[in-house]
Image: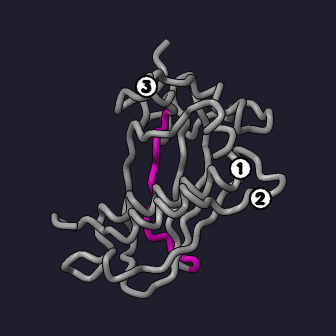
Amino acid sequence: MRGYGVPVARQLQLVRLLARPRPPIPGQGILDPSVTTMRVRPADLDIYLHVNNGTYLQMMDVARTNYIADLGGFPLLRQKGWYPVVAAQTVTYRRSLTLGQRFDVTTRVVGWDERVVYLEQVFTRGDDLCARGLVAGRFLTRGSGVRVPAPEVIGLLGDGRPAPELPEDVAGWARSLGVAHRA
């Protein structure tokens, strides 16, 4: 594929995961973390030989796909005709990831409101924090594009737990971007 920094390999990984998701984890709850282990590939690198900032976003897509798979969510979402989209995201970088390094992306839901499900995605290599992403996700209905209220999605995928209070940094971030529910 031509263009600047389009890592085809991560796109193919995502397509494969959507076609054949990993098996659900028995007892996995909506607030339980999901861990995806990856290794830095040559196509992930920029000209400075560390992971390209855009590649982090694709790695986050892969990890969120695994999160949904861990919940056993794909058949449920397919039945409803719902699919996830990113409304907003931000990443803070701490340490570089370089060729061949193995790392984990831990994905967890930190809360939701009427419109949005909020996730935190943390990249670690051993005990080292490499990056932290915040994601505001919505669900849409296939064909019509109608937004699905976040509590309905949580009701479908969740285990009946009430919404936790959003961490203040996440709530402030959501308000500043205008993605948070407005009363």
Q: Residue at x 64, y 26 (%)?
A: 151
**Which amino acid type corresponds to the residue marked 1 in the rendered image?**
Leu
**Distance between the alpha carbons at the discs numbered 2 and 1:** 7 Å
Which tag is nearer the camera, tag 1 or tag 3?
3
Query: Are dots 2 and 1 in contact, CB under 8 Å?
Result: yes
- Category of crowding for the residue at label 3, using alpha-carbon neighbours closer than 10 angstroms: few (below 14), some (14–19), many (at least 20): few
- Which residue is identified by label 1? 71
Left of 10 or right of it: where is 149? right
Which is more N-terminal, label 3 or label 1? 1
What's drawn in magenta, residue-wise?
126-138
| x, y percent for residue 7 | 31, 68
Q: Residue at x 39, y 45 (%)?
A: 89
| Residue 136 within the segment the image draws in magenta | yes
**Which amino acid type corresponds to the residue marked 3 in the rendered image?**
Gly
Which is more N-terminal, label 1 or label 2? 2
Quadrant placement of the N terminus: bottom left
Q: Residue at x 46, y 58 (%)?
A: 60
- Which residue is identified by label 3? 145
Q: Is the residue 13 above or below the residue 84 in the image? A: below
Question: Which type of secondary structure does the marked residue at label 2 adopt?
Answer: loop
Q: Is the residue 118 above or below the residue 142 in the image? A: below
| x, y percent for residue 18 | 54, 55
